[in-house]
Amino acid sequence: MDMYGFYTGQSFDAYTFLGAHPADAGWIFRAFAPAAAHMSVLLDDGEHGMERCYDGNFFQVTIPGLQAGDTYEYRVYHRDGGYTDHCDPYGFEMELRPAHRSVLCDLAGFKFHDEAWMSRRSPGFSAPVNIYEMHVGSWRKPGEEPADWYSYDELGSLLVPYMQETGYNCVEFMPISEYPSDESWGYQGTGFFAPTRRYGSPRQLMQLIDTLHAANIAVVLDFVPVHFAGDDYGLKMFDGTALYEYPHGDVGVSEWGSQNFMHSRGEVRSFLQSAANYWMQVYHFDGIRMDAISRIIYWQGDPARGENGNAIDFLRVMTKGLKERNAGCALYAEDSTNYPKVTSPVDDGGLGFDYKWDLGWMHDTLEVLQSDPDQRRDKYHKLTFSMMYYWNEKYILPFSHDEVVHGKATILQKMNGDYEGKFPQGRLLYMYMMVHPGKKLNFMGSEIGQLREWDEKREQDWFLRKYPLHDSFYHYICELNRHYLTNPAFYAEDYSQNGFEWLDCAQEERRLYAILRRGGGRRIAAVFNFSEVVQENFTVQIPEAAGIEVLLYSDWQRFSGATPETEKICSFADGKLTCTLSPFSALLVSVETA
């Protein structure tokens, strides 16, 4: 580790120096604690003093006779005479909560078999990116208790066939760096370099990722660079002072009650950059989704409080450095602000992310589907507004975990109307999502029409597939996903204006829309009926079209709709598509070029 780079916030490899590492004479422990009066390593056999070293801001000791799996923590003595015991900020493994000691971990020796995958991976701007967001502990469970979890490697044998069956080619894990409270879902962490012990060991996580790569499935990690848990054994007041956090509560405490990282401090930047790089270098994660970026751009996430210039600079250094060190990786920003050029390269004045979550699209789309069908006349252009700003960034369309908790209802439950009436609108919603430009993200359980809000203590309601409405909805999502993955018109020109065209977006009274997509030498058209009545003889002109082929209709009987597949629902003549659409339905056709 370059010391100057560490202090100036340029380091991406601090984990190779700090923490506990095997050495010829035993295990060497190094910690950064400039304000500490003294430090020691606590082991089962007692306390081992550390020596102040290097420039005086570090402590170090080599202890013989230890082996991987032994637990330890640091005792940090304060200058006022007191002390606090902390886990290792750079520890590679931790005990299962509520225990919180670090665990000696030798990361060497695991052999990945994904060289071919790593050499060809890319952010996928002109490729299909269909992300399945999941919470590892509540996707499926081997038992009924909250702490019944599959291990990382066990998960692979379940997850790979499911991803292949459903048509998702990327999985995003909600935070799995160690955290104390199950209810925080990993967003308030204590071990930024340690995979949570809830699901097994670091090697088991490596095996999971290797298994996913062998099946051509990309893996994204949800990473939290904004704040950390306030538990005393964690980063809080690590050396007796505010080493990682702001010293003042007005900006030092987040809206979630956690501690905000002080991004103006070089050592903090190097800590976070090294952590993000570590997950990609050591575990072969293909991408990082960075949580709550608005809280970095603006003080406390509030534009009225102004930009946090030092934190913005940190983002630029981090994204550029990660891209330089991890070929083909993808960086995702969860950002709800209007801050410009989030997905532009740093060298062009941007923040350097590959993708930005389009939270505006998500909110507007769900608002329309939640509203009474008659009100959709007035809300009609909420579904066209996204294309007014879409070309400013490279967007991903997210229906994430945040939309299925805290009284918000699940995605399908949000649909207006009674139980049976929600399903056709859900099918309509997901067709619109797939045809709209941008990469896709869907939270686990949404594909089966989950109606119970997500609870991290319980697995998804897989029993719902015993009911025809839910099972047919699942098969509809699978088929829609397969069309998306295999037809480049959906994705090849996601970020080119040539790839999208409104065929009709001026049907406020009828609440109809029509879209044309182009890409990879293919074209598709889709028409949408957001009203509660049959819409007859809806005609749209398709430029340079010689014919059409029906690919998918959301109201077919096999999806629990009302329309037999033998029934003719559209015709084509003189470059015009004419169709009759059932209430809350969507039609997808391929277009032959004249």
Image: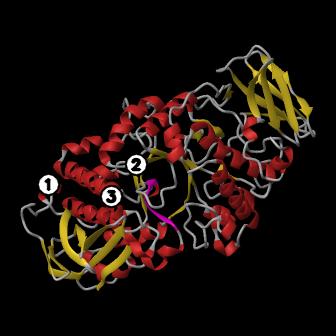
> Residue at 10% of width from left, 63% of height from top?
563
Q: Is residue 489 left or right of residue 527?
A: right
Q: Where is 105 relative to 453, above or below?
A: above
Q: In this rendering, would 373 be left or right of 71?
A: left
Residue 415 in sight from this viewpoint: no
Q: Amino acid at mark 2?
A: Asn
Residue 304 is drawn in which quadrant? bottom right
> Foreground: 38 or 219?
219
Residue 484: image tag: 3
Above or below residue 580? Residue 488 is above
* Residue 28: quadrant of the picture: top right
Magenta residues, dominant SS class? strand
Q: Residues within 10 Å of mark 1 (few under 14, many from 20)?
A: some
Residue position for label 1: 558
**Distance of label 3 from label 1 (alpha carbons):** 19 Å
Q: Position of residue 441 (x, y in %)?
A: 42, 56
Numbered mark located on residue 169 in the image: 2
Foreground pick, 377 / 558: 558
Secondary element at image label 2: loop
Task: Kindly identify the residue that appears in the image at 78 percent across and 52 percent down.
Answer: 9
Depth order, front residue of 346/98: 346
Q: What's the residue type where badge 1 is placed?
A: Arg
Q: Which of the two discs, 1 and 2, sits closer to the camera? A: 2
Marked residue nearer the N-terminal end (3 or 1): 3
- Up the image or down, 581 lies above or below 188; here it is below
Q: Are marks 3 and 1 in contact (CB under 8 Å)?
A: no
Is residue 223 highlighted in magenta? no
Q: What's under tag 3, amino acid-wise? A: Tyr
Q: Please tell me in which quadrant of the rendered image residue 418 appears.
A: bottom left
